């Protein structure tokens, strides 16, 4: 029913009431860019503060936004428990690859970090662990010699001190700019993981979106227990390359965490909000003894 | 003064606010859901924007869309009306972040007065009488001892409570432990906060509230009381001003208490302090509503002040020119809320196409509505479709006038409660002015008996 024909409303010719000189008249509404974020999956707008409070997971559809390594450590490790290892290690242009020096400089500026992985020890639920968190903001988390060295040292520290290792992975694969030296890291990290395993110690990997290439083909899939975040892309070669090679259409959700769960490559898909509790339970189940801390958070169950 | 305001509401209150703006020369922006595309407020505003689907969560509570429309249209202020986002502290804070004036109190004020326990403490500290009871007590033995002091019957109430949950009435000390623990458990599960306090259960009681206006300069004026005891399931049906139960002496003390309350919290803009009046005419602070109320029109009719226009002026930074010594309640005003419901079938909502409409008129007869002939009432929103308000020189004359106006009111095509109101206005308990909040319940029982 078209009501615009029925109502003969006019705009009353009233001048704006002038109640003195007030600032209100000059105000113009302005929405700061950082206020909202649009969820790329459900397209609904989310308040940035709401998103941060919800572990950067969309409250409407559950889409897991990518988070930086420092933020990951904050929501996983107990408050103030993280002690970083090898913070000052940085890469050099070992094989003189063109433009690599500039790319490294930009990566440091953009991410605020020195490399694509942060390692250290921490407490999770009171249990002491060695924690490594990869950083997608630094050259897409690609693995170069420094990345491989830091992870290896983390494993060696854990082996020596009889601690479990937890690694959060996110990576575009081996770092092309360091050539065969990057590929070598696959073997090096795997060897360190094996020695850690031979010592009877627990190694858990948490695969996050996207984990691909040389990282998937080495330490990421060597965990005793492999967890993943929902809908994470976990691959060796990317989907497009595979499609072109086999000339077949790929199944829906190919290389998603849920697909891998089905095929037996992932042990459990855990939403981000439950990750810390899951890790804590697994650690305790495998012999970690949680240390009682003074500040007890009420009812986190 | 704002040159453009966005009205974040619908129905009769959106129309009310738009009318106030049109008088003041302010341009108006309406927002509407898909179900409201033929609504009156959309037709009346200078600009209108569809912001989502029929469900309120998709449209009228869609904060992102509303703020976007404000930015797009250049609206300098948002009037939230009542209900919906009017007491949403997060929304008020976001408006501020986006440089939009929220027409109401600050986000901090809304949050502060929304915490019932904190509100009681604040009022008590300010010397405002509060329902006898206790603050939050965690330990059951301590609580039981305090309960004996307070006396029975009493209510155990959740601090974060609402919607009738987290409340238990206790009549005897033997029932106390059970009630205390179950109220805590219910509150913890429903609101995530199991803290409870206690209040003496006052019965019979009258609900009398005070209308306040405060500007940004600390000036507070109290516009008198409204009695709202005719309620069905905690929903008000009829309101009147002045209250037949209040003597000038009690009025003076209540107005002073309300103004003290406003000053104690540094309140800004329009607000209402709700009191309970017991049979001995003692009054106690119950809670404070930090928004414009449905029944604001009753006060407007006896005091002769446009409350919505003052809300806008105050928000724009103007000083209140109304002073307490110039506030008088002239005669009596009564309001009847017209709901689209079937009074004969347990008040189930009635929606659909409205047929012929005739709106009563005459001196001091006012009907605030958003309906019109051939309008389709959407089923997604509350059932109130209009408010009929009259004002006369005395209470008796006001009742006569209301009966006259109700008898003329014609809204065909749907069921509404006009006849119920006529019936109530003839009820001896209403006419005597001695009705309490148990009025509708008692009336229902009497009807059952007689059938």
Image (cartoon, grey):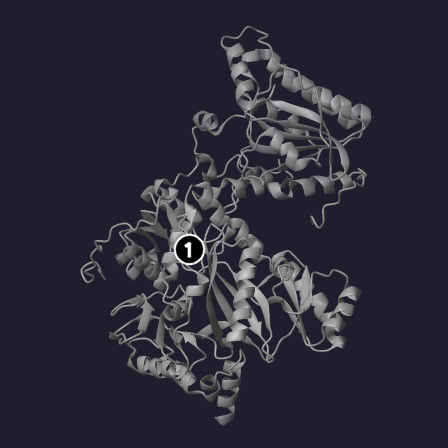
Given residues B106 and B54, the one toward you in this image is B106
In the rendered image, which quarter contains the N terminus of chain A? bottom left
At label 1, counting other C-alpha atoms closer than 10 Å, the crowd grade (few under 14, some 14-19, many 20 or more) is some
| Residue located at (48% from left, 70% from top) | B225
Tell me, yes or no, if residue A45 can be seen here.
Answer: no
Task: List x then y, in percent, for residue A230.
Answer: 56, 40
**Residue that sits furthest to the bottom in the current view:** B450
- B131 versus B418 height, above or below: above
Given residues B219 and B285, the one toward you in this image is B219
Task: List x then y, in percent, for residue A123.
Answer: 74, 34
Quarter occupied by residue B165:
bottom right
Element at label 1: loop
Task: List x then y, in percent, for residue A33.
Answer: 44, 35
Count of marks, rendered view: 1
Which residue is disc 1 drawn over?
A: B320
**Residue that sits furthest to the front in the current view:** B325
| Residue located at (65% from left, 59% from top) | B125
Task: List x then y, in percent, for residue B397.
Answer: 36, 83
Tell me, yes or no, if residue A299 can be seen here.
Answer: yes
- B125 versus A244 height, above or below: below
| Residue located at (56% from left, 22% from top) | A138
- B445 versus B66 height, above or below: below
Left or right position of B140 against B279: right
Given residues A258 and A57, the one toward you in this image is A57
Left or right position of A137 against A118: left
- A262 versus B431 height, above or below: above
- Tell me which chain the residue with mark 1 is part of: B
């Amino acid at each position: 029913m078209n009501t615009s024909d029925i109502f003969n409303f006019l705009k009353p010719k009233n001048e704006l009431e002038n109640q003195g000189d007030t600032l209100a008249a000059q105000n113009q509404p302005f929405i700061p860019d950082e206020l909202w974020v649009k969820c790329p999956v459900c397209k609904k707008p989310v308040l940035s503060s709401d998103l941060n409070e919800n572990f950067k997971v969309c409250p409407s559809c559950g889409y897991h936004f990518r988070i930086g390594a420092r933020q990951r450590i904050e929501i996983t490790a107990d408050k103030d428990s993280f002690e970083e290892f090898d913070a000052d290690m940085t890469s050099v242009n070992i094989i003189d690859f063109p433009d690599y020096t500039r790319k490294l400089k930009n990566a440091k500026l953009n991410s605020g970090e020195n490399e694509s992985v942060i390692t250290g020890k921490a407490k999770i639920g009171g249990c002491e662990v060695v924690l490594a968190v990869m950083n997608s903001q630094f050259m897409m988390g690609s693995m170069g010699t420094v990345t491989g060295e830091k992870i290896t040292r983390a494993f060696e520290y854990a082996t020596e001190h009889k601690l479990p290792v937890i690694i959060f992975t996110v990576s575009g694969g081996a770092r092309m700019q360091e050539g065969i030296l990057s590929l070598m890291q696959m073997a090096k990290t795997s060897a360190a993981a094996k020695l850690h395993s031979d010592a009877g110690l627990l190694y858990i990997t948490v695969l996050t979106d996207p984990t691909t290439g040389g990282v998937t083909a080495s330490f990421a899939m060597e965990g005793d227990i492999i967890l993943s975040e929902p809908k994470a892309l976990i691959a060796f070669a990317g989907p497009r390359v595979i499609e072109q090679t086999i000339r077949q259409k790929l199944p829906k959700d190919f290389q998603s965490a849920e697909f891998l769960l089905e095929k037996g490559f992932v042990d459990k898909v855990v939403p981000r909000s439950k990750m810390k509790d899951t890790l804590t339970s697994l650690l305790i189940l495998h012999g970690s003894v949680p240390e009682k801390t003074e500040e007890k958070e009420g009812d986190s169950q | 003064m704002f040159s453009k305001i966005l009205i974040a509401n619908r129905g009769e209150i959106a129309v009310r606010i738009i009318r106030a703006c049109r008088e003041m020369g302010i341009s108006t922006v309406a927002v509407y859901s898909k179900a409201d595309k033929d609504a009156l407020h959309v037709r009346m505003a200078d600009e209108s924007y569809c912001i989502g689907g029929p469900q309120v969560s998709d449209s009228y509570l869609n904060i992102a869309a509303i703020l976007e429309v404000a930015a797009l249209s250049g609206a300098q202020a948002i009037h939230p009306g009542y209900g919906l986002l009017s007491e949403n502290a997060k929304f008020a804070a976001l408006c501020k972040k986006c440089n939009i004036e929220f027409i109401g109190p600050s986000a901090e004020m809304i949050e502060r007065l929304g915490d019932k326990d904190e509100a009681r403490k604040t009022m008590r500290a300010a010397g405002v009488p509060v329902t006898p009871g206790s603050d939050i007590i965690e330990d059951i033995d301590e609580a039981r001892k305090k309960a004996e002091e307070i006396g029975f019957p009493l209510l155990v109430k959740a601090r974060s409570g609402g919607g009738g949950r987290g409340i238990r009435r206790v009549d005897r000390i033997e029932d106390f432990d059970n009630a205390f623990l179950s109220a805590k458990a219910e509150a913890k599960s429903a609101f995530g906060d199991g803290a409870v306090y206690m209040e003496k259960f006052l019965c019979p009681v009258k609900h009398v509230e005070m209308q306040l206006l405060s500007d940004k300069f600390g000036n507070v004026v109290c516009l008198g009381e409204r009695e709202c005891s005719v309620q069905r399931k905690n929903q008000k049906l009829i309101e009147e001003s002045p209250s037949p139960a209040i003597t000038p002496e009690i009025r003076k003390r209540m107005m002073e208490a309300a103004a003290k309350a406003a000053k104690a919290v540094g309140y800004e803009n329009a607000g209402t302090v709700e009191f309970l009046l017991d049979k001995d005419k003692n009054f106690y602070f119950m809670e404070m509503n930090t928004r414009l109320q449905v029944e604001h029109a009753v006060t407007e009719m006896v005091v002769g002040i446009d409350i919505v226009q003052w809300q806008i002026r105050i928000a724009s930074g103007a000083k209140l020119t109304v002073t307490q010594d110039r506030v008088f309640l002239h005669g009596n005003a009564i309001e009847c809320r017209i709901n689209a419901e079937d009074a004969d079938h347990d008040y189930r909502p009635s929606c659909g196409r409205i047929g012929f409409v005739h709106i009563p008129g005459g001196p001091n007869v006012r009907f605030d509505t958003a309906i019109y002939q051939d309008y389709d009432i959407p089923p997604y929103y509350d059932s109130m479709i209009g408010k009929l308000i009259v004002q006369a020189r005395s209470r008796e004359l006001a009742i006569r006038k209301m009966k006259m106006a109700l008898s003329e009111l014609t809204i065909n095509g749907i069921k509404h409660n006009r006849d119920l109101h006529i019936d109530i206005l003839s009820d001896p308990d209403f006419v005597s002015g001695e009705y309490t909040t148990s009025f509708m319940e008692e009336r229902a029982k009497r009807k059952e008996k007689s059938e």
